[in-house]
Image: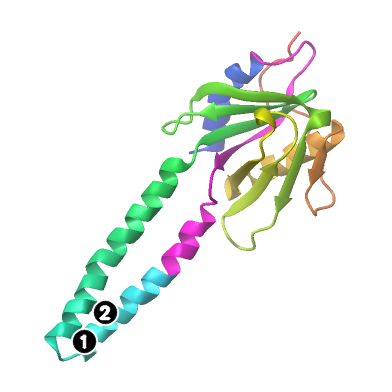
């Protein structure tokens, strides 16, 4: 889903949670649960196995060997698609917004990215975010271990179209007195001008 569409839909809900004089500086969409990068990693051995079975069908003269290869070719992709579907069902889309005063975690609908409910709000000074690079994989890992979420650690995955928004959010957390362990330098503090919502007064 396009970034601007998600942001346009979430802005009114975020504005209702702003404290007097506060405004949104940055925000990004994320997913809970096991990183979608594992879908890519899981698919590799199945693709190789299917390719090997397909090659073996042309080389194996016996019916028994071809039958085994046929079972692999049929049920291998079925098992993979089922496993990936179950992983997707366990993920919850969230929107993480950083304002001048707080971090807001908002649950989104699976279809359309509409705001559903606020999960928690936490003052920036009590926020602790940790990210790590995932090489060339399309999703970046993020961990929230500060205030909010009932004191439980929250592990998230952020898709690459939101990478600049994530960097801005991390910079805003640092500027607000929170902890943002990024392993990066040169994070620029966002001015919030990209967000059309007015300052809460």
Mark 1 and mark 2: span between their CA atoms? Answer: 7 Å
- Is residue 83 part of the magenta span, yes or no? no
Helix, strand or loop at disc 2? helix
Name the image quarter holding residue 133.
bottom right
Are dots 1 and 2 in contact, CB under 8 Å?
yes
Residue 108 pos. (x, y %) = 51, 29
Which region is colored magenta?
16-44
Left/right placement of residue 82 relative to residue 12 reads left
Location of mark 1 (residue): 58
Q: Is residue 163 left or right of 41 when viewed as pictured?
A: right
Of residues 168 and 62, the one drawn nearer to the viewer in this rendering = 62
Residue sitting at the far front: 151
Q: Residue at x 30, y 66 (%)?
A: 76
Residue at the (39%, 47%) spot, across then down: 86
Secondary element type, mark 1: helix
* Residue at 80% across, 23% down: 101
Residue behind mark 2: 54
Looking at the picture, how far across and down is residue 62, in whole percent? Answer: 14, 89
Q: Can residue 5 be seen from the camera position used here?
A: yes
Q: Position of residue 157 (x, y in %)?
A: 59, 46
Location of residue 164 (image quadrant): top right
């Amino acid at each position: 889903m396009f970034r601007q569409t998600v942001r346009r839909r979430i802005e009114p809900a975020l504005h209702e949670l702003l404290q007097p004089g506060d405004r949104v500086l940055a925000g990004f969409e994320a997913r809970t649960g096991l990183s979608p990068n594992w879908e890519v990693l899981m698919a590799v051995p199945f693709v190789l196995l299917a390719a090997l079975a397909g090659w073996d069908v042309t080389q194996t003269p016996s019916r028994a060997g071809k039958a085994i290869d046929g079972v692999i070719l049929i049920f291998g992709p079925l098992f993979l698609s089922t496993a990936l579907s179950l992983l997707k069902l366990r993920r919850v889309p969230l929107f993480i917004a950083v304002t001048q005063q707080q971090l807001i975690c908002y649950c989104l609908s699976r279809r359309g990215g509409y705001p559903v409910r606020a999960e928690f709000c936490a003052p920036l000074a009590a926020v602790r975010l940790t990210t790590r690079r995932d090489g060339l994989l399309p999703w970046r890992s993020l961990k929230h271990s500060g205030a909010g979420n009932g004191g439980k650690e929250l592990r998230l995955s952020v898709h690459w179209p939101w990478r600049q928004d994530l960097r801005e959010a991390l910079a805003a957390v640092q500027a607000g007195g929170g902890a943002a362990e990024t392993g990066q330098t040169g994070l620029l503090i966002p001015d919030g001008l990209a967000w059309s919502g007015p300052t809460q007064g």
